[in-house]
C-alpha cells in the first residue's frame, strides 16, 4: 500500500502578503534614513500586489500604505515650497509625526491580524468622488 498521497492541500498565500505588508511598513520607516527611496519602492510593491489582496483584510493595509505615501508626498512638497516663509518647517514637522503615526498604527494593527479601520480613502476621498 502506498502511503504517499498526491492530494495537494489548497495553499493559502495570505501569510505571504501579510509578510509583504510588514516589509512595506519597514520600507516606509527606512525612508526617514535613506532619503525616501524605500518609500517609493514600498508604494510600487503596493500597487503591484494590490490585486492579490483585493477583498481580504489585507486590502485595508495596502490602501493605508498607498494613501500614506501620496499624502506624505503632498505634505513634503507643500512644506518644501513654503520653507522660505518658515511655515514649511511646521508643515514638514507635522508631516513627519503624521507618517510615523501611520506606520506605527498600521504595523501594530497588522501584527494583530486586524484590518485598518476607516482608512483615509474611505472618508476623505469618497467625498471628492461624489
Image (cartoon, rainbow, N blue to C red):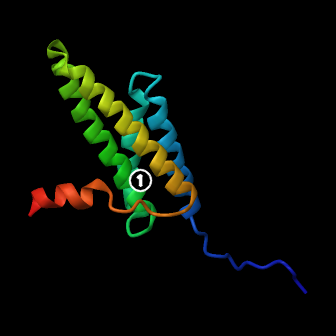
Which residue is outermost to the right?
1
Say whether residue 40 is visible. no
Query: x and y percent of residue 41 in the render?
Result: 41, 36
Instruction: Please give the name of the residue rendered at 83% of the width and 77% of the height, measured from the top-left corner.
Output: 4
**Which residue shows up at 45% across the image and 63% down it?**
115
The image position of residue 2, as x and y in percent, is 87, 82
How far across and down, in percent of the image, does residue 93 sit?
32, 27
Please tell me how many numbered marks the rendered image carries.
Answer: 1
Closer to the camera in the image, 44 or 23: 23
Please determine whether, in this image, residue 31 is positioned above or below residue 45.
Answer: above
Residue 33 vertical placement versus 50 (above, below): above
- Give 21 or 95, whichever is nearer the viewer: 95
Residue 45 visible, this angle: yes
Quarter of the figure with residue 42: top left
Q: Residues within 10 Å of mark 1 (few under 14, many from 20)?
A: some
Quarter that holds the N terminus:
bottom right
Q: In the drawing, does residue 60 fall left or right of residue 11?
A: left
Looking at the image, the residue that sits furthest to the bottom is 1
Q: Measuring from the top left, give residue 88's x and y in whole percent.
A: 21, 21
Q: Which residue is mark 1?
A: 49
| Residue at figure coordinates x 42%, y 42% from the top left | 101
Amino acid at each position: 500500500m502506498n502511503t504517499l498521497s498526491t492530494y495537494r492541500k489548497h495553499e493559502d498565500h495570505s501569510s505571504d502578503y501579510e509578510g509583504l505588508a510588514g516589509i512595506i511598513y519597514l520600507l516606509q520607516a527606512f525612508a526617514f534614513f535613506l532619503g525616501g527611496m524605500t518609500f517609493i519602492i514600498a508604494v510600487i510593491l503596493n500597487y503591484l500586489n494590490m490585486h492579490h489582496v483585493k477583498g481580504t483584510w489585507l486590502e485595508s493595509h495596502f490602501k493605508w500604505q498607498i494613501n500614506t505615501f501620496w499624502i506624505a508626498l503632498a505634505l513634503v512638497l507643500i512644506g518644501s515650497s513654503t520653507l522660505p516663509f518658515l511655515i514649511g518647517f511646521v508643515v514638514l514637522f507635522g508631516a513627519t509625526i503624521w507618517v510615523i503615526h501611520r506606520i506605527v498604527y498600521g504595523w501594530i494593527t497588522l501584527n494583530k491580524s486586524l484590518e485598518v479601520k476607516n482608512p483615509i480613502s474611505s472618508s476623505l476621498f469618497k467625498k471628492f468622488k461624489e
